[in-house]
Each structure stands twice: as C-alpha cells, then as structure tokens.
Image (cartoon, coloured by chain):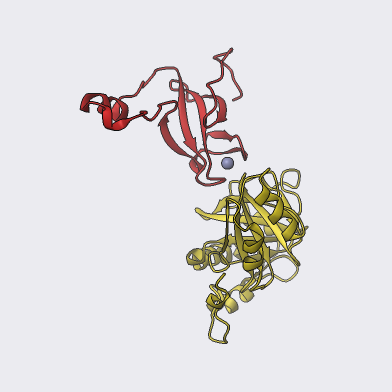
Amino acid sequence: MANDTLIKNETRVSPAAHLYQEMADASVPGALSLSEVAFSTKVSVRCAPGSAGFDAVATATGVGLPQKVGEVRGEVDTVAVLWLGPDEFLVAAPEDAQLAAKLDQTLGENPGQVVDLSANRSVLELTGAKAPLVLRKSCPADLHPRAFAVNHAITTSLANIPVLLWRTGEESWRIMPRASFTEHTVRWLIDAMIEFRTETI
Amino acid sequence: MMLIDCPHCGPRNENEFGYGGEAHVAYPENPAELTDKEWSRYLFYRGNKKGVFAERWVHSGGCRKWFNALRDTVSYEFLAVYGAGEAQPEIQQLQGGTR
Ligand SMILES: [Zn+2]
C-alpha cells in the first residue's frame, strides 16, 4: 500500500482548522463544547461475514468486526470499528499511517477491499449534557439512551447532509460528515448551540 | 414522513431510501437474441399494479443495500420487506399491517 500518500509536514490543514476559534467561542462552559478531532485514521473495510477475509480482518483489528446495525467494536481512544452495512465497516483510530496497509495485507487475495479513507470525512466532537438537544434539532434518528447507547454509531443525517453519528461517551458524540460538508456542519452546529448560552428561565 | 423497515437497519425515514421500480424483472438470458419488441418489453413495460406490488428499494442513506418490498400502491402501506433475490412472500392480511 502507498503509505507515502500521507502528507507528513506542517503545512497540512484539517477541514475545520479555520473554524477553531469560532467553535471555541460557541462552546458553553459546563453544557456544550464543539471541537475538531483532526487527522485521525479511518479505513474502509469491505468483506462478507462468514468469509475467510472477514475472519482474517476481524482478527487483525484486535477487536473484531461488528455484525449488526449500530454496533461498534473496540473503543474510541484506541481502535474502533463501526458498522456501515452488512459487509462494510469503518475502522477508526488515532493517527496510524500503517493501519490500512496492515489490514490490506491481512485481507490478502480474499474477496473484499481495504481503503484508507482518512481524508474522506472530518471528525467533529460535540460534548456536554445538552448535546442531544443540539443534535435533535435536525437529526431524524432516535437519540434516546434506550435506542442510542454509549458506543453506538449509525449512518444518519444532520442538517440535511449524510453523516456518521457515534456516541463515544455518556455525554460525547462524534459527527463525521464528508470533508467538504465540514464548514456547513460546523456553522449549523454553532447556530444550534446559541440558545444554550443563556440561562434557562 | 413514512417509515420504511430496512432489512439491515430497521425502521428509517423514507427520505433515506431510493426507489428501484418493479421487482422480479429478470434480465433476459440472451439479450442479443431478442427482437426489438421483446427488448422494449423488458426495458419499459411494467405491471403498474393497483394494490400489492413487489418493488425494489435501496437504502442509499444508510447501509446502501438493495432489498425488495411488498407495498400497497393505493395506501402506500409496506406489507413486507425481503432480501434481493428472495422469493416474494405470501401476504395473508392485506389491511392493518404494521403501520
Ligand atoms: Zn439499511
């Protein structure tokens, strides 16, 4: 695999870098915080459950591969695998330039594919007790804890664009729009957060 | 907003789905041997039924998988969903289904 496609220098810019200050200003101490998780690694894996390739990649991730909608294997801080479809998964990890090559090697000649999609989506982190209220303004998914437990992730929409929504903790959510939708998503979130700056009457 | 029960993801809003026309329209074994009339029948002629209709749907805003559904074209009610390539299920009760 071509690891050299990863640009390793100080000039690289993450999709929401220019919105850093605006996100910080929009945050509400004790209630809401919005930030970007820049330059994390995301690897797309496609292989059919029950196949040799599936078993091989499941072993190689160290946490297996999820088998049903919403399921996430692993943890946000180390390596996690999100379910995108019956034979499509997204391996998310902190920056790791070797991950895609490692999984691709594991898949070998088996039917399927491993593609480094790190630059495909930006990762936004919304935390705080009010986060579900912000998301609910335009996300049609059921975000009630009964339906959306910690470490649950689905493909859904937010502000009318497709996103991956991942509840990484009791009060923390990761929103992953395609990179070109980053500005739209951030500005929509900032707008949705405004009302929580004032005291509830 | 109508809910459609994706076989992989469960109930989701209808705007996550795309419509793929009538189900169980087999691709001709040997298209080159068909007359123009037969080919046009395959390409353009569909049942357009009033009532229970077998259709293809794709969950483009979710798992991106194709599946089949039985839908009542009068009431819009989805009576069953089943996998692509599976046989059409028998529907016992035509009214008051799941929703
Ligand atoms: Zn689906």
In the picture, the quarter occupied by the C terminus of chain A is bottom right
Front residue (pair A108, A8): A108
Q: Which chain is red?
A: B
- Percent of width and height locating residue A11: 53, 86
At horizontal 51% and vertical 28% (from top left) the residue drawn is B69
Please state if B29 lies on the left or on the right of A65 as rendered. Answer: left
Q: Which chain is yellow?
A: A
Quadrant of the displayed image that contains ligand 1: top right
* Rendered position, B82 above or below A50: above
At horizontal 53% and vertical 65% (from top left) the residue drawn is A120
Whether residue A12 is visible to the viewer of this picture, yes or no, is yes
Examine the image and state in which quarter residue A121 appears.
bottom right
Please state if A130 lies on the left or on the right of B45 as rendered. Answer: right
Q: Residue furthest top?
A: B92
At horizontal 47% and vertical 25% (from top left) the residue drawn is B76
* Rendered position, B87 above or below B5: above
- Percent of width and height locating residue A91: 66, 60
In the picture, the quarter occupied by the N terminus of chain A is bottom right
Whether residue A198 is visible to the viewer of this picture, yes or no, is no
At horizontal 47% and vertical 66% (from top left) the residue drawn is A180
Front residue (pair A121, A113): A113
Front residue (pair A151, A119): A119
